Amino acid sequence: MAEPEADTIELPPVPEFGSGRPRWAAQRIHPRRLARGHLAQWARLRAWTIAEDHPTRGKTVTARAAGLGFGALMVWRTANEEPRLLAVAAGAYAINAWRAGRPVPPSEDDLKRRVLLGVQQLLGDDPAVFVRDVYDALRARPAAAHLDDARLRAVLVHCGITIHRSVRISADKTGRSGIKAADVTALLSPAPVETPSEAVDAGQPAPEGAVDPA
C-alpha cells in the first residue's frame, strides 16, 4: 500500500507541458518543450557567433563564421553520402533541445503571486468571495487536487491572505467566511518606496547644521 503524501503548505504550479502531476509532466516529450529548447539552443549559438563580449570581436566572429560554414558543408556532404548519420545527428539535437527546454521551477514568491492572481480572478468585480468557492476552484486544478480544506487554508494563510469569518458579496450572499478583494489587491500592489526625510546632495548625507536652500 502506497504511503500518503507528506503534508505541505506549498501549492505546486500546473505543469507547462502536458497534463497531470508536475513531477511527471515535466519529463514528457512535448512539442512546446522541444520548441523552447530549440529556440534556446539557437540563441546560444547566435551569442557564440557574434561574440559580443570578446576582446577581439572582429577576428573571432570571422573565425567562428568560417567554422560554422565548414560544419554546414560537412553536414551537407554527410546527408548525401550517409543519410543514417544525419538521422542520428537529428536525434541527438532533439535530445539536447528537450533537455534545454526543461521548465525552470518557480520561486516561492512566484508561487504565492500565482495563488493571489488566481484568487483575484475568482473575485472578478465582486467585493469578496467565499472561501468554499476558493477551495473548490483550487481543487479543480491538477496541482491541488490532492489537498484537503485544512491544507488549502494553510496555503492561503502562507500567502498572506486574511480569511474573514463573515463577508458580504451581495444582499443574498452574506454571512459566510471568505476573502475580501481589498486584501488581495493590497498584497498584489507593490510596496511604496520610502523617501528620505532629509535632503541629500549627490547621494551624500547632509552635514550637521546644514540649512536647506529656499
Image (spheres, rainbow, N blue to C red):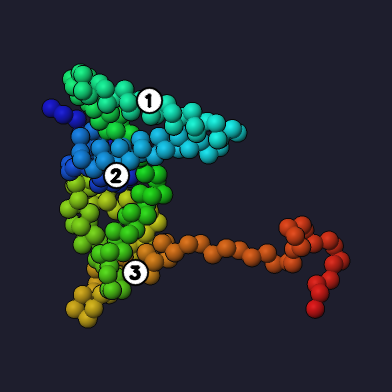
The structure residue drawn at horizontal position 21% and vertical position 23%, both measured from the top left corner, is 80
Q: Quadrant of residue 33?
A: top left
Q: Quadrant of the C terminus?
A: bottom right
Amino acid type shown at disc 3? Ala
Which residue is under mark 1?
Answer: 70
Which mark is in front, 3 or 2? 2
Contact between marks 1 and 2 (CB within 8 A): the answer is no
Amino acid type shown at disc 1? Phe
* Mark 2 residue element: loop
Q: Quadrant of residue 208?
A: bottom right
Which residue is under mark 2?
Answer: 12
- The answer to whether residue 8 is visible is no
Q: Is residue 211 above or below residue 136?
A: below
Q: Residues within 10 Å of mark 2 (few under 14, many from 20)?
A: some
The structure residue drawn at horizontal position 37% and vertical position 55%, both measured from the top left corner, is 113
Distance from Cα at disc 1 to Cα at disc 2: 47 Å
